Image (cartoon, helix red, strand yellow):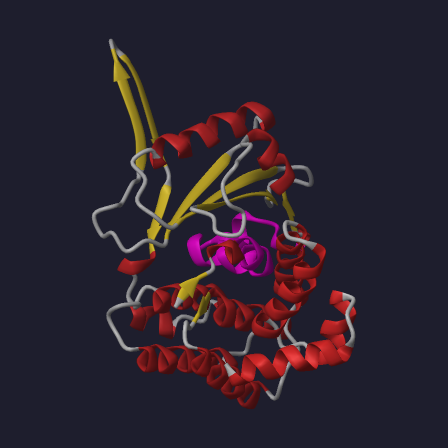
Amino acid sequence: MKRDDALWKAILEDVFDDFLRFFVPNAEKIFDIERGFVFLDKELEQLFPSNQDEFNPKYVDKLVKVFTNEGNEQWILVHIEVQGATDKGFSKRMFTYFYRIFDKYQRPITAFAILTDRNKQFHPTRFEQNYLGTKLLYDYTTFKIIEQDENELMLSESPFAIVILTVKTALLKGKVSDNELFDQKINLVKRLLSKQFDKDKIRALMNFLKLYVRFEKKDLITKFDKELDTLTNKQQPTMGIEEFVLTRERKLGELKGIEKKNLDFVQNLLTKTDFDNAKIAELAGVKVTFVQKERLKLQKS
């Protein structure tokens, strides 16, 4: 079973209003949520050039411009870090983000660290420096997923709680069997479908649940996909996640030879999306018969 932390970038955009409501109890009074948000990914990349593997990142960062209810042009910045491993330099990095962002925008910043690792001893909350009477203290909000109460999350009416529950399910690896993990994911699907969420959000959350943690065994993947089709009546996935996956797979294909690229691209679409043969053939620029043969090979393997 593998986690796909890169999907955090997409799901944060799909349910960012719910992210705010989840972490800020009076979010509706503070923020002008109806005005929408500006995601500053390109600007953040300019401030923090990174050579980390974009397909398997150690962390995911996000910077969002959010308007407040104080006036038409009043806005603040929300900085989010999703950290998947223990990092002794994490707090220093959080502070580095703060001062570079503040230097560029000169706006209030609120920062959130979402920790998706299993190390219960790793719980950074501040960066501190004190030398010869000069003291610096930078605090930020930390949310450790492994420490969250599953029952409280299950009772929550927040769509973002489904995101947290999905990640918490992934953290069960090694503690329960694959079949038990399968049951956990199916239960989450049923709970999601029982909620009165916006249809687009349901599709986005469903895709995050499906793609964030995938089973190693192909028979479980097939079984889960069939069960998902039954429960959802084969609802089409949201474009937010689709576009993210397609863009990433195209980039992966460009790194390989033209001949192998088509094969890999088709295989990835077959395993990671619900597209039919004709759609995959159109996207990959190959014949439908080629896709049919590859699908049969995967089903037999």
- Residue lying furthest left: 121
- The residue under the point 26% across, 68% down is 174
Looking at the image, residue 72 lies above or below residue 227: above
Of 216 and 140, nearer the camera is: 216
Residue 276 shows up from this direction: no
Q: Is residue 288 left or right of residue 62?
A: right
Left or right for 285, reference 197? right
Towards the viewer: 265 or 143: 265
Q: Residue at 67% of width from left, 76% of height from top?
A: 275
Q: Which residues are magenta?
A: 9-34
Q: Is residue 13 in the magenta section?
A: yes
Q: Residue at x 70, y 77 (%)?
A: 291
**Number of marks in the rendered image:** 0
Q: 157 above or below 100?
A: below
**Quadrant of the rendered structure where residue 139 is?**
top left
- Predominant secondary structure in magenta? helix
Of residues 22 and 93, the one nearer the viewer is: 93
The image shows residue 271 at horizontal and vertical percentages of 57, 73
Q: Is residue 151 visible?
A: yes
Q: Is residue 294 above or below residue 132?
A: below
Q: Position of residue 68 (x, y in %)?
A: 59, 44
Q: Which residue is situated farthest in the top direction here?
A: 132
Spot occupied by residue 197 in the image (x, y as percentages of width and height)? 56, 74
User: Could you tell me which quadrant the N terminus lies in?
Assistant: bottom left
Q: Position of residue 41 (x, y in %)?
A: 61, 42
From the viewer's side, name the closer residue of 159 and 2.
2
